Image: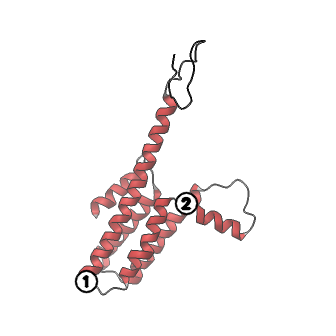
Amino acid sequence: MLAAAVASVVLCFWKGFRNATCGALALAYFAAEGWYWIDGPRTVGDLFMLDVVTILLITCKTIARHPRIEPFRDGIDHLAAFLAAPTFADRLILGLFILAVWPAYFMEPGTARWFMLWGATIAQFIIAGGESLHNYALHRREAKSLSKEPEEPPGPYRIAWAGVETWQT
């Protein structure tokens, strides 16, 4: 778990990856661990509040990622933009809070609860890291395509066949 949290911090701040969701998840993990080492085990209410802060950080990221030039027409337009802003990975991570983490809080303390929380947390880290790697690959591909030399213009005897990338003579 510590390795996943450290990797998330790296993915949060490394130039090509920059993903605030990784940072929010790592912040929640380190806050819970630090709180445990300072003051002992946390109650479910304390962990729930850390989850709420993490969710707020993730939704703030999506709001910042969804710029609007014109003002919102009304509250429904604002809500629609807010709900459309999260990425697919962010929706999966938020869904894991609702479908796995919070139900685990109602389970009896024990091994099953620990494994359910551990699995959900690892899944969230993997999803956030996968989103970072995907975005990095997209930016690399975009940068490569912009740096390619332009193809030479067709001569008088060259024709371009539909769907063919290169010129045929």
Tag 2: residue type? Answer: Thr
Residue positioned 58% across, 13% down in the render: 155
The one of 144 and 3 positioned closer to us in this rendering: 144
Residue 34 appears in the picture as rendered: no
Q: Which mark is residue 62?
A: 2
Count every numbered label the image shows and give the total: 2
Residue positioned 51% across, 20% down in the render: 168
Q: Left of 20 or right of it: where is 154?
A: right
Q: Quadrant of residue 81?
A: bottom right
Q: Mark 1 highlights which residue?
A: 110
Task: Point out the residue furthest to the left here.
Answer: 111
- Which image quarter is the N terminus in? bottom left
Tag 1: residue type? Answer: Gly
Q: Quadrant of residue 85?
A: bottom right
Q: Residues within 10 Å of mark 2 (few under 14, many from 20)?
A: many
What scheme was used to colour the molecule? secondary structure
